[in-house]
Image: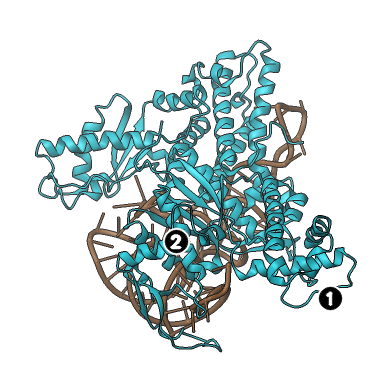
Amino acid sequence: MDIFADFRRRIIAILESMMADGRLPETLDLGRFVVEPPRDSTNGDLATNAAMVYAREAQAHYKSPRQFATALAAVLAEDPDVDTAEVAGPGFLNLRLQPNVLGAVLRESLADAERFGRGRPAGDPRPINVEFVSANPTGPMHVGHGRGAVFGDALANLLSFAGHDVTREYYINDAGAQVDVLARSAFLRYREALGHNIGAIPEGLYPGDYLKSVGDALACQHGDSLLAMEEAAWLPRVRQDAIDAMMGMIRDDLASLNIRHEVFFSERSLTVPQPGHNANAVEEAIEDLDRKGLIYQGRLPPPKGQLPDDWEDREQTLFRSTDFGDDVDRALRKSDGSYTYFASDIAYHKTKVDRGFGVLIDVLGADHGGYVKRMVAAVAALSDRKVGLDVKLCQMVKLLRGGEPVKMSKRSGDFVTLREVVDEVGVDAVRFMMLFRKNDAPLDFDLDKVIEQSKDNPVFYVQYAHARGRSVLRQAVAAFPDLDVSAKALATAKLDALTDQGEVELIRMIAQFPRIVESAATAHEPHRIAFYLHELASALHTHWNRGKDHPELRFVKEDQRDLSCARLALVGSLTIVLKAGLGILGVSAPDEMR
RNA sequence: GGCUCCGUAGCUCAGUUGGAUAGAGCAGCCGCCUUCUAAGCGGCAGGUCGCAGGUUCGAAUCCUGCCGGAGUCGCCA
């Protein structure tokens, strides 16, 4: 249960009845006010700005926002769940709830631990597609890819937790010139495997050692038979083998971060005719736009800034992306007549629209910023504005060690791989740190700091809070050997003993979890979960420590079984929320720190 | 030059979609271990929310214009 959403509904009902009675104008847009925690919790449990939001429209009925709020307060005070309803400041309405309301939330979190905080499928029932990583299949993943990978995966977790049907998807760029370069690079390694002296890797080919095994495999499979062929003959075969090998490597890299995609979509598949069609997907997508009158032959103004050397003014096939908010119309064919990357991307996104997704999310590197408007335009055009595309750009990751930038080795191809980082600091640290920042802010990742076991390290700090909670439950069993500390059992504890301010504060924070999930999911911002967990962990550590100066506040009181049970219910609920939140981030919730 | 993102405490960053006296963590100073884990906690100090206008009951948040930083700029992917 989300008490904020719940009371928002109750207030809507009140406003509606006031509208029906003529106590308010009938035209109010009831979607505009909010119910949220008051900034200062001494003001109560819930606050709403409804009276201020509608003050202007209600002026004929209530002179001031405060007067309106007073009227609203009078009705709300009748609600059996409300203790007090007070008007504050310019017209805020602060509600203090009966203790049993928050208690019910706590009880619910224990009784149905698996579901607490989860959203119900509501609103747009269409599934959401999250496309992320989509690293070129030309080598192992590096740290920058890792950020997008973790972000996309956590976002997918979050949306799924919030009640949406989510598909994780990877777009394999296996059709461009870069995979031909990959094939030639692999062919070189193939010759090397056959004993040829290949010397230095020529400029323009991929030099990485990771292609040696591809060369070995080719030699093993084909012997020297490829050597006699023309490039046009061997390239397609070598290319596919190399791509498969690279994708295998990338899947392993992703698996090391516990990331799995449901769909791997091949760009190349868009360029071959589909069964039962006489055109390929790219051609069909462009025909589709053409039928909508969005394709034309025309000229583009030269690019601003530095003019490319080979700029030529020519007539070309253009998409009217400016009809959908882009700055300039975009080219769909290169000068040699082949399609641009944008054209296949349009076709690719058309498949997403056709597959019935209602919301598309693309997770890309910040260097793709210039690409956003045209892609949003394309999706709007393809779906007649019925499908939204949200492009989440992840900023760069700066890798540090002890505060100093990690030198990227100049030995070409030998960059710091994602795998090296995961192996050094662990999945949990990588995932949490990548999510403990907004996606559009650059990230410093310090290899030394993230394995530190101290409060300076938020990963550790949050995990420790969970472990501490679990430890308390273990201690409780030691004190009361017959006690059942399972969540289900704790849900039946008498909770009215939880009266200490710190305890109430913790319950309030637990009650916020559902709305944090909801708002983070709506905003497509998983970092909000990470920050919430950090605050929750901090609150737990704080309260735990108060038990030092005030032994009567400790969770386990051997001579007071009922009181202990109530407090253990609180601890149990905290571990449930911490674990659920960490689960969204894809970070483990250990029972003890060792 | 165009577009996108960013600018909040000495440093690194949050800020619940326009709310109440702008918050954390580092770093600095002062405290707390016969105790369910001190791997932690409390307190003090620290601010012209880049600048200037505008919108309104109310702006760090929305709009405009500047200043500063990052990215990007027909057919590359």
Mark 1: few, some, or many residues within 10 Å (few <14, many ≥20)? few
Q: Which amino acid does label 2 sit on?
A: Ala
Label 1 secondary element? loop
Q: From where the camera sits, is residue A500 visible?
A: yes
In the image as oriented, which residue stretches furthest toward the top? Answer: A482
In the rendering, at what x and y percent does residue A187 appear?
Answer: 77, 67
Chain coloured cyan in this rendering: A
Is there a contact, CB below 8 Å, between mark 1 and mark 2?
no
User: Can you say whether A115 is above or below A69 in the image?
Assistant: above
In the rendering, at what x and y percent does residue A229 appear?
Answer: 75, 69
Q: Chain B is drawn in which colour?
A: brown
Occupied quadrant, residue A483: top right
Image mark for residue A552: none
Locate the C terminus of chain A and report the quarter of the image it occupies.
Answer: top right
> In front of the other: label 1 or label 2?
2
Q: Which amino acid does label 1 sit on?
A: Ala
Locate the N terminus of chain A and report the quarter of the image it occupies.
Answer: top left
Label 2 secondary element? loop
Residue carrying label 1: A200
Q: From where the camera sits, is residue A456 visible?
A: no
In the rendering, at what x and y percent does residue B15 appear?
Answer: 45, 53
Is A330 positioned to the left or the right of A205 in the image?
left
Question: Which chain letter goes with mark 1?
Answer: A
Residue carrying label 2: A279
Occupied quadrant, residue A590: top right
Mark 2: few, some, or many residues within 10 Å (few <14, many ≥20)? some
